[in-house]
Image: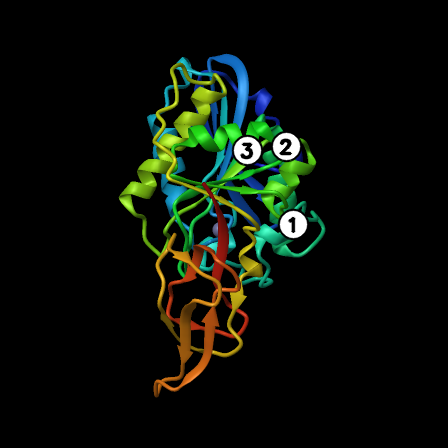
Amino acid sequence: MNHLAIAPELFRPDGFERGRVHRLSLMSGAQSIPVLLVRGEAAGKTLVVTAGVHGDEYEGVRAILETVASLDPRAMRGDLLAVPVAHPAAFRAARRTSPLDELNLARVFPGDSAGKPTEIVAAALAGAVIVHADFYLDLHSGGIAYAMPTMAGYDASDGRSAAAARIFGAETIWGHATIAPGRTISFARARGIPWIYTEARGAARIDPDDLRMMKQGILNLLCHLGTLPGEPVVRPIRYKLSGDGDTDRGISAGHEGFLLNHVRLLEEVTEYQRLGVLVDVLGEPMEEYRAPRSGTVALIHEFPVVKPGDSLYLIADRER
Ligand SMILES: [Zn+2]
């Protein structure tokens, strides 16, 4: 088993021997980004998968590690290029953002190799990893603070992305007409690379069902691309959501306090329905949050202690 440290600008997946798994790290400034390259025996398409773009989201990390361990590269036609921990500084701190510069890796793409630490990581991931994708999958979840439906999110303007979301195996899919700039997927989109991303229940633990969905989803995409033989194993889709998925643009807290949440994930709410109340430690209400319109609850700040500016709720539209 080799473990090579390499500069991002020198990384050429095509130069690695076929029919085996390569474990290496991209040395990006002072940061080391782990990379798993499964080189199929025969030539074919490349699926790029990242997890840990937010350092407190763990389902995708485990899904990548276990999936790579289960694959036989000699039976593959094409490659899997996977980064299990995309933002090592945030991962080590168990935080969504970097302790080095307070930046959110999912807001700084395409990054800057001469910039702040998080921008340097983004530049390495964009230029040395995502750029090699025939299809790109970014595994996210609710992390420590949020709960989100276990789902696949896709580009509603790209049929390749929508088709992949349908065969991924998630019971909830969410189509976005617009994508906020600075994300991994906005970089992929700008390069014409089709993509999907996931969310999962999060809450600082790995739900076995979510793990199973993500692992099967990676295999499903490999089948969909022709890298693995066989057909995707698909579950019926129960929820089709649409609308803006930017967690920064939800209903946010104006104070610090303790959130008394009154709704559940994927609950249907009507306009002006009460979602939750923020109280102080004596139980005095400080803010009340109501649905700005009818729709489906797609994000809840499950961690009850909130700070000013934290996103608390996101309401999506539901297609029938
Ligand atoms: Zn995330």
In the foreground, 21 or 83: 83
Figure quadrant of the C terminus: top left
How far apart marks 3 and 1 lie (CA) works out to: 16 Å
| In this rendering, the label closer to the viewer, 1 or 2 | 1
Q: Position of residue 304 (x, y in %)?
A: 37, 70
Are the residues tagged 3 and 1 within 8 Å (C-beta)? no
| Mark 2 neighbour class, 10 Å CA radius: few under 14, some 14 to 19, many 20 or more | some
What amino acid type is highlighted by mark number 2? Val
The tag on residue 182 is 1
Whether residue 94 is visible, yes or no, is no
Identify which residue is drawn at 69% across, 47% down: 113
Q: CA distance from mark 3 to mark 2?
A: 9 Å
Q: Secondary structure at mark 1?
A: loop
Residue situated in front as seen by the camera: 257 or 26: 257
Instruction: Give the residue type that dot 3 points to.
Output: Tyr
**Residue at x-position 59% and y-position 21%:** 14
Residue 146 position in % (x across, y down):
42, 59
Residue 218: which quarter of the image?
A: top left
Q: Position of residue 36 (x, y in %)?
A: 47, 32
What is the distance, in whole Å, between disc 1 and disc 2 at their CAs? 15 Å
Q: Are marks 1 and 2 in contact (CB under 8 Å)?
A: no
The amino acid marked with disc number 1 is: Gly
Q: Earlier in the sequence, mark 3 or mark 1?
A: 3
Q: Which mark is residue 131?
A: 2
Residue located beneath label 3 in the image:
136
Give the number of the mark in front: 3 or 2.
3
One can see residue 245 in this view: yes
